[in-house]
Image (cartoon, rainbow, N blue to C red):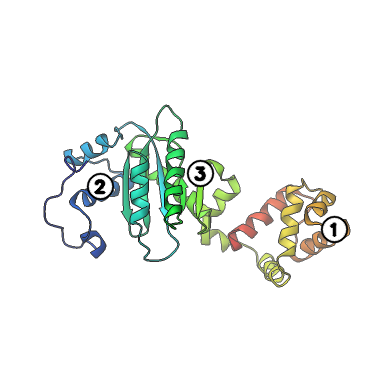
Amino acid sequence: MASVCSVGSETPKGISSATRMMTPTQICLGRVLKDLLAGRPPVVAPRRASLVASGLEEDADLVVVVACLGDQGADVGPVRGCLAAASPGLVVARQDGVVAVLPVAEGSTDRVIAAVRKALSTMAARDVWPSVGVSGIHSGWLSVPAAYDEATHARRSLSGSPGLRMIEQMSTLDFLVQSQGEDGARLVKPAIRAFLAEDLESNGVFVATLKAYIAANLNAKEAALTLMVHPNTVYYRLERIAERTGCDVRRVDELIDLLLAVRLVRGD
Protein backbone atom coordinates (compact mmCIF):
# COMPACT_ATOMS: atom_id res chain seq x y z
CA MET A 1 0.00 0.00 0.00
CA ALA A 2 3.00 2.27 0.46
CA SER A 3 3.30 2.73 -3.30
CA VAL A 4 -0.11 4.36 -3.59
CA CYS A 5 -0.28 6.24 -0.28
CA SER A 6 2.52 8.73 0.14
CA VAL A 7 2.83 12.04 1.99
CA GLY A 8 6.34 13.04 1.07
CA SER A 9 9.46 13.20 3.20
CA GLU A 10 8.43 15.92 5.64
CA THR A 11 6.01 15.62 8.56
CA PRO A 12 3.61 18.57 8.74
CA LYS A 13 3.64 20.90 11.75
CA GLY A 14 1.21 20.15 14.56
CA ILE A 15 1.66 16.38 14.35
CA SER A 16 2.16 14.65 17.73
CA SER A 17 5.49 13.12 18.72
CA ALA A 18 3.96 9.65 18.37
CA THR A 19 2.90 10.45 14.83
CA ARG A 20 6.39 11.73 13.98
CA MET A 21 7.65 8.18 14.58
CA MET A 22 5.27 6.78 11.94
CA THR A 23 6.23 6.01 8.39
CA PRO A 24 4.88 8.26 5.62
CA THR A 25 2.47 5.48 4.64
CA GLN A 26 1.10 5.20 8.17
CA ILE A 27 0.64 8.97 8.34
CA CYS A 28 -1.24 8.89 5.06
CA LEU A 29 -3.49 6.08 6.24
CA GLY A 30 -4.22 8.07 9.40
CA ARG A 31 -5.38 10.96 7.25
CA VAL A 32 -7.54 8.65 5.18
CA LEU A 33 -9.21 7.38 8.36
CA LYS A 34 -9.67 10.93 9.63
CA ASP A 35 -11.49 11.80 6.41
CA LEU A 36 -13.71 8.73 6.65
CA LEU A 37 -14.62 9.32 10.31
CA ALA A 38 -15.56 12.89 9.47
CA GLY A 39 -17.91 11.65 6.73
CA ARG A 40 -15.66 13.04 4.01
CA PRO A 41 -14.73 10.45 1.35
CA PRO A 42 -11.13 11.04 0.29
CA VAL A 43 -10.81 13.08 -2.89
CA VAL A 44 -7.03 12.95 -3.28
CA ALA A 45 -6.17 10.21 -5.74
CA PRO A 46 -3.45 8.46 -3.66
CA ARG A 47 -5.76 8.25 -0.65
CA ARG A 48 -8.63 6.84 -2.70
CA ALA A 49 -6.22 4.37 -4.26
CA SER A 50 -5.02 3.25 -0.83
CA LEU A 51 -8.58 2.30 0.14
CA VAL A 52 -9.21 0.40 -3.08
CA ALA A 53 -5.89 -1.39 -2.73
CA SER A 54 -6.94 -2.55 0.76
CA GLY A 55 -10.18 -4.05 -0.56
CA LEU A 56 -12.40 -1.11 0.32
CA GLU A 57 -14.14 0.04 -2.84
CA GLU A 58 -16.26 3.17 -2.42
CA ASP A 59 -19.51 1.19 -2.16
CA ALA A 60 -18.04 -1.89 -0.44
CA ASP A 61 -19.66 -3.59 2.52
CA LEU A 62 -17.54 -3.06 5.61
CA VAL A 63 -17.29 -3.24 9.37
CA VAL A 64 -15.34 -1.08 11.79
CA VAL A 65 -13.27 -2.57 14.59
CA VAL A 66 -12.19 -0.46 17.58
CA ALA A 67 -9.54 -1.83 19.93
CA CYS A 68 -8.24 -0.21 23.10
CA LEU A 69 -5.78 -1.11 25.83
CA GLY A 70 -6.81 -0.20 29.34
CA ASP A 71 -3.53 1.42 30.39
CA GLN A 72 -3.06 5.06 29.43
CA GLY A 73 -0.08 5.48 27.15
CA ALA A 74 0.17 1.75 26.41
CA ASP A 75 1.86 0.83 23.14
CA VAL A 76 -0.87 -0.01 20.64
CA GLY A 77 1.63 -1.04 17.97
CA PRO A 78 1.20 -4.78 18.58
CA VAL A 79 -2.58 -4.41 18.34
CA ARG A 80 -2.32 -2.60 15.02
CA GLY A 81 0.20 -5.10 13.70
CA CYS A 82 -1.88 -8.16 14.60
CA LEU A 83 -5.08 -6.73 13.12
CA ALA A 84 -3.29 -5.63 9.95
CA ALA A 85 -1.77 -9.10 9.53
CA ALA A 86 -5.09 -10.87 10.10
CA SER A 87 -7.26 -9.12 7.51
CA PRO A 88 -7.10 -6.78 4.52
CA GLY A 89 -8.44 -3.30 5.11
CA LEU A 90 -7.46 0.03 6.66
CA VAL A 91 -5.84 -0.35 10.10
CA VAL A 92 -4.64 2.75 11.93
CA ALA A 93 -3.05 3.22 15.36
CA ARG A 94 -4.28 6.30 17.21
CA GLN A 95 -3.51 7.76 20.62
CA ASP A 96 -6.66 6.18 22.07
CA GLY A 97 -6.28 2.78 20.43
CA VAL A 98 -6.59 1.16 17.03
CA VAL A 99 -9.33 1.62 14.44
CA ALA A 100 -9.76 -0.80 11.55
CA VAL A 101 -12.12 -0.51 8.59
CA LEU A 102 -12.36 -3.99 7.15
CA PRO A 103 -14.10 -5.20 3.96
CA VAL A 104 -16.86 -7.76 4.28
CA ALA A 105 -17.35 -10.48 1.69
CA GLU A 106 -20.68 -12.01 0.68
CA GLY A 107 -22.69 -10.12 3.28
CA SER A 108 -21.28 -12.09 6.21
CA THR A 109 -18.96 -11.03 9.02
CA ASP A 110 -17.83 -14.62 9.67
CA ARG A 111 -14.44 -14.24 7.99
CA VAL A 112 -13.80 -10.85 9.56
CA ILE A 113 -14.71 -12.06 13.05
CA ALA A 114 -12.52 -15.14 12.57
CA ALA A 115 -9.65 -12.86 11.54
CA VAL A 116 -10.17 -10.62 14.57
CA ARG A 117 -10.28 -13.64 16.89
CA LYS A 118 -7.06 -14.89 15.32
CA ALA A 119 -5.48 -11.50 15.96
CA LEU A 120 -6.65 -11.59 19.58
CA SER A 121 -5.09 -15.05 20.02
CA THR A 122 -1.81 -13.74 18.65
CA MET A 123 -1.96 -10.77 21.01
CA ALA A 124 -2.76 -12.99 23.99
CA ALA A 125 0.38 -15.03 23.24
CA ARG A 126 2.27 -11.73 23.55
CA ASP A 127 0.48 -10.85 26.78
CA VAL A 128 -1.47 -8.04 25.08
CA TRP A 129 -5.13 -7.88 26.14
CA PRO A 130 -7.25 -5.26 24.36
CA SER A 131 -10.97 -4.70 24.59
CA VAL A 132 -12.42 -4.84 21.08
CA GLY A 133 -15.74 -3.72 19.63
CA VAL A 134 -17.07 -4.62 16.19
CA SER A 135 -19.83 -2.83 14.28
CA GLY A 136 -22.53 -4.35 12.16
CA ILE A 137 -22.24 -4.45 8.37
CA HIS A 138 -22.42 -1.07 6.63
CA SER A 139 -22.13 -0.11 2.97
CA GLY A 140 -19.75 2.42 1.52
CA TRP A 141 -17.26 5.00 2.73
CA LEU A 142 -19.98 7.38 3.88
CA SER A 143 -21.20 4.79 6.40
CA VAL A 144 -17.91 4.68 8.33
CA PRO A 145 -18.93 7.25 11.02
CA ALA A 146 -22.05 5.26 11.95
CA ALA A 147 -20.09 2.00 11.96
CA TYR A 148 -17.42 3.60 14.16
CA ASP A 149 -20.07 4.70 16.68
CA GLU A 150 -21.43 1.14 16.85
CA ALA A 151 -17.98 -0.38 17.36
CA THR A 152 -17.22 2.18 20.07
CA HIS A 153 -20.46 1.38 21.91
CA ALA A 154 -19.71 -2.34 21.67
CA ARG A 155 -16.18 -1.85 23.05
CA ARG A 156 -17.35 0.36 25.91
CA SER A 157 -19.89 -2.27 26.93
CA LEU A 158 -16.92 -4.41 27.99
CA SER A 159 -16.20 -1.78 30.70
CA GLY A 160 -12.46 -1.96 30.06
CA SER A 161 -12.23 -5.75 30.33
CA PRO A 162 -10.32 -7.56 27.59
CA GLY A 163 -12.35 -9.43 25.02
CA LEU A 164 -14.45 -9.07 21.89
CA ARG A 165 -17.98 -7.67 21.69
CA MET A 166 -20.01 -7.34 18.50
CA ILE A 167 -22.80 -4.79 18.30
CA GLU A 168 -25.25 -7.62 17.54
CA GLN A 169 -24.46 -9.12 20.94
CA MET A 170 -25.64 -6.02 22.76
CA SER A 171 -29.19 -5.84 24.00
CA THR A 172 -31.28 -2.72 23.46
CA LEU A 173 -30.73 -1.95 27.13
CA ASP A 174 -26.94 -2.28 26.73
CA PHE A 175 -27.00 0.08 23.77
CA LEU A 176 -29.14 2.65 25.57
CA VAL A 177 -26.83 2.65 28.57
CA GLN A 178 -23.71 3.06 26.44
CA SER A 179 -25.21 5.76 24.22
CA GLN A 180 -26.66 7.83 27.07
CA GLY A 181 -23.65 7.71 29.37
CA GLU A 182 -23.40 10.44 32.02
CA ASP A 183 -26.28 12.41 30.52
CA GLY A 184 -28.63 9.52 31.18
CA ALA A 185 -27.22 8.88 34.66
CA ARG A 186 -28.15 12.41 35.71
CA LEU A 187 -31.82 11.53 35.14
CA VAL A 188 -31.80 8.79 37.78
CA LYS A 189 -34.06 9.67 40.71
CA PRO A 190 -32.45 10.44 44.10
CA ALA A 191 -34.40 7.60 45.73
CA ILE A 192 -32.86 5.09 43.35
CA ARG A 193 -29.39 6.52 43.94
CA ALA A 194 -29.93 6.14 47.69
CA PHE A 195 -31.06 2.55 47.14
CA LEU A 196 -27.92 1.78 45.12
CA ALA A 197 -25.74 3.25 47.89
CA GLU A 198 -27.52 1.02 50.40
CA ASP A 199 -27.04 -1.95 48.10
CA LEU A 200 -23.28 -1.41 47.98
CA GLU A 201 -23.21 -1.52 51.77
CA SER A 202 -25.06 -4.85 51.55
CA ASN A 203 -22.52 -6.36 49.13
CA GLY A 204 -24.83 -5.91 46.16
CA VAL A 205 -27.45 -8.45 47.26
CA PHE A 206 -30.44 -6.31 46.29
CA VAL A 207 -29.32 -5.62 42.73
CA ALA A 208 -28.27 -9.28 42.37
CA THR A 209 -31.76 -10.30 43.51
CA LEU A 210 -33.35 -7.82 41.11
CA LYS A 211 -31.39 -9.22 38.18
CA ALA A 212 -32.11 -12.83 39.13
CA TYR A 213 -35.82 -12.02 39.50
CA ILE A 214 -35.96 -10.45 36.04
CA ALA A 215 -33.95 -13.33 34.52
CA ALA A 216 -36.45 -15.76 36.06
CA ASN A 217 -39.37 -14.00 34.32
CA LEU A 218 -40.51 -12.43 37.60
CA ASN A 219 -40.69 -15.81 39.32
CA ALA A 220 -39.41 -15.31 42.86
CA LYS A 221 -39.07 -19.05 43.55
CA GLU A 222 -36.93 -19.56 40.43
CA ALA A 223 -34.83 -16.57 41.41
CA ALA A 224 -34.34 -18.10 44.85
CA LEU A 225 -32.98 -21.28 43.26
CA THR A 226 -30.52 -19.22 41.21
CA LEU A 227 -29.40 -17.26 44.26
CA MET A 228 -29.43 -20.36 46.47
CA VAL A 229 -31.54 -18.68 49.15
CA HIS A 230 -34.99 -19.30 50.61
CA PRO A 231 -37.89 -17.86 48.56
CA ASN A 232 -38.90 -15.75 51.56
CA THR A 233 -35.50 -14.06 51.36
CA VAL A 234 -36.22 -13.07 47.76
CA TYR A 235 -39.68 -11.78 48.71
CA TYR A 236 -38.16 -9.72 51.53
CA ARG A 237 -35.53 -8.22 49.26
CA LEU A 238 -38.10 -7.39 46.59
CA GLU A 239 -40.25 -5.64 49.19
CA ARG A 240 -37.22 -3.70 50.32
CA ILE A 241 -36.44 -2.71 46.74
CA ALA A 242 -40.03 -1.54 46.24
CA GLU A 243 -39.96 0.49 49.46
CA ARG A 244 -36.64 2.18 48.72
CA THR A 245 -37.21 2.93 45.03
CA GLY A 246 -40.98 3.30 44.72
CA CYS A 247 -40.92 0.69 41.95
CA ASP A 248 -43.72 -1.84 41.63
CA VAL A 249 -41.74 -5.05 41.16
CA ARG A 250 -44.77 -6.74 39.60
CA ARG A 251 -44.81 -4.35 36.64
CA VAL A 252 -42.45 -5.10 33.76
CA ASP A 253 -42.25 -1.48 32.61
CA GLU A 254 -41.21 -0.25 36.06
CA LEU A 255 -38.67 -3.05 36.45
CA ILE A 256 -37.10 -2.17 33.10
CA ASP A 257 -36.91 1.46 34.14
CA LEU A 258 -35.26 0.48 37.44
CA LEU A 259 -32.79 -1.86 35.74
CA LEU A 260 -31.90 0.86 33.25
CA ALA A 261 -31.26 3.26 36.13
CA VAL A 262 -29.02 0.68 37.81
CA ARG A 263 -27.03 0.20 34.61
CA LEU A 264 -26.70 3.94 34.01
CA VAL A 265 -25.37 4.62 37.50
CA ARG A 266 -23.14 1.57 37.88
CA GLY A 267 -22.35 0.75 34.27
CA ASP A 268 -22.82 -2.98 34.91
User: Is residue 179 toward the left or the right of residue 14 in the image?
Assistant: right
Q: Which of 44 and 221 is in front in this view?
A: 221
Residue at (57, 62) in percent of width and height: 185
Disc 3 residue type (three-letter): Met
In the picture of the structure, the residue carrying the numbered disc 1 is 235
Crowd around label 2: few <14 · some 14–19 · many ≥20 (10 Å): many
Q: Earlier in the sequence, mark 2 or mark 1?
A: 2
In the image, residue 114 lies at what x, y percent? 46, 38
Q: Earlier in the sequence, mark 1 or mark 3?
A: 3
Report the number of numbered marks.
3
In the picture of the structure, the residue carrying the numbered disc 2 is 29
In the image, residue 262 lies at what x, y percent? 64, 60
Q: Residue 40 carries which label?
A: none
- Classify residue 75 by image quadrant: bottom left
Residue at (85, 51) in percent of width and height: 221
Disc 1 residue type (three-letter): Tyr
Residue at (36, 39) in percent of width and height: 87
In the image, residue 168 lies at what x, y percent? 53, 40
- Classify residue 147 by image quadrant: top left
Q: Which of 140 and 107 is in front in this view?
A: 107
Which quarter of the rendered picture does the C terminus lie within?
bottom right
Disc 2 residue type (three-letter): Leu
In the picture of the structure, the residue carrying the numbered disc 3 is 166
Q: Nearer the viewer, mark 2 or mark 1?
A: 2
Q: Can residue 198 be seen in this view?
A: yes
Question: Distance between the Cα atoms at labels 1 and 3?
Answer: 36 Å
Crowd around label 1: few <14 · some 14–19 · many ≥20 (10 Å): some
Dot 3 falls on a residue whose secondary structure is strand
User: Is residue 213 toward the left or the right of residue 73 in the image?
Assistant: right
Q: Which of marks 3 and 2 is nearer the N terminus?
A: 2
Q: Do the residues labelled 1 and 3 touch (CB within 8 Å)?
A: no
Residue at (81, 62) in percent of width and height: 237
